[in-house]
Amino acid sequence: ETMRNFLQELPKCEHHVHLEGTLEPELLFELAKRNNIVLPEQFPKSKAELTERYNNFADLQDFLDFYYIGTSVLLTEDDFFQLAWNYFERVAKNDGLAHTEVFFDPQSHTERGVSMDTVVKGFKRGCEKAEEELGISTKLIMCLLRHLPSSHGLETINQAEEYIVNGHIHALGLDSAEKPFPPELFVECYEKVKQLHGSINLTAHAGEEGDHTYITNSLDLLNVKRIDHGVNSIQSVELLQRLSDERILLSVCPLSNIKLQVFKELTQIPLLKFLEHDVPFSLNSDDPAYFGGYILDNYIAIHENFGFKIEIWEKIVKNSIHGSWCHQSRKDELL
Ligand code: HPA
Ligand code: ZN
């Protein structure tokens, strides 16, 4: 209990949470009804059934199949606002979250005829209300879906041009099925956003199911300055050294790794290796509505399995603050 309080009060920063992955079963069914969305015939019919199914993902793709059905209930600007607000309110109040950089997947909405404006305006309104009323800081990261062709990604960047230029979209990421869609397929997309906004931040999912070359190629070819997941970096000592030297933050997602069967047990997540090689990492929830826990649950699960001393927790939290993409003055407040 005192440990829970200690972890709750740490000034936590989250760098890896998909807003569409915060869609709780309750809101999913509510929006499906409100928007007259017919869910697939085999889709679980109740909250209890759906939650039960979420306990049995075979792998990343099995999860993604549910995740994209979930996204299909989001239609109006208010839906996107409500989704984001529910997450911000929950983690600010329950989890002691201070700063969060949230992913969204516009292509999963524009493909269904929902406009980029609807998506970004709804999420942006959620971010603004959270900053004003909850005192947390937020950033939006637009992700491209790597199972779609890079030409679709380029089109998406064009649709988002206004928001990239004005900074409402703060960074670019890359998600969805990692294999067989290596980073080199998206070089043009990463170059294009850089042209639109020279100081835009860049990240990519890599080394969750792909091997260590997915990480190295994301760094070399996409020029990313952060790696989402990145756990397969342990396959290469040279890479670990590089991540440490260049202060590349890995956004590790413990409960996600268990639910998607990347690791059998939490103790197998290579946090000790990262600490040993001084590789910076943060702890994150990924898709909390699907993986059974928000950010504090991830911190608690790691504490229960690793029993880190206070000094280690302080190091993890400091690295998370330093690796954040907020203004230095905000970092100083949190440190
Ligand atoms: N990996 C890849 N794509 C995703 C994830 C993830 O963890 N979550 C949502 N989309
Ligand atoms: Zn993710």
Image: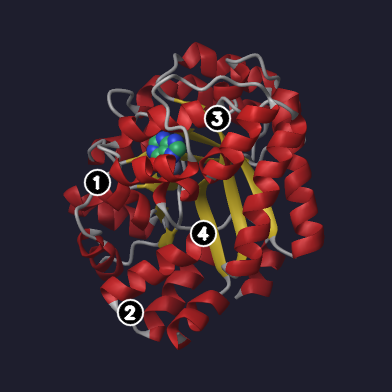
Secondary element type, mark 4: loop
Location of residue 203 in the rendering, given as x and y in whole percent from the top left corner? 48, 41
Instruction: Measure the alpha-carbon separation of dots 4 and 2.
Output: 20 Å
Give the label, 1 or 4, closer to the camera. Answer: 1
Q: Nearer the viewer, mark 2 or mark 1?
A: 1
Kind of residue at disc 1: Val
Closest to the camera, between mark 4 and mark 3, is 3
* Dot label at residue 71: 3
Label 2, label 3: how far apart the Cα atoms are? 37 Å
User: In the rendered view, would you say 115 is above or below 284?
Assistant: above
Q: CA distance from mark 4 to mark 3?
A: 29 Å
Name the residue nearer the viewer: 48 or 174: 48
Which label sits on residue 29?
none
Q: Kindly indicate the quadrant of the structure image that contains residue 315.
A: bottom left
Question: Residue at coordinates 58% horizontally, 72% vertically from top-left?
Answer: 11
Q: Horizontal placement of 325 versus 239: left or right?
A: right
Which of the two labelled residues, at mark 4 and mark 3, occupies the earlier sequence position?
Answer: 3
Q: Position of residue 129 (x, y in %)?
A: 79, 52
Instruction: Identify the mark at residue 308; answer none if there is no mark.
Output: 2
Q: Residue at x 33, y 79 (%)?
A: 308
The label number, if any, that marks residue 323 in the structure image: 4
Within-10-Å neighbours for mark 2: few <14, some 14–19, many 20+: few
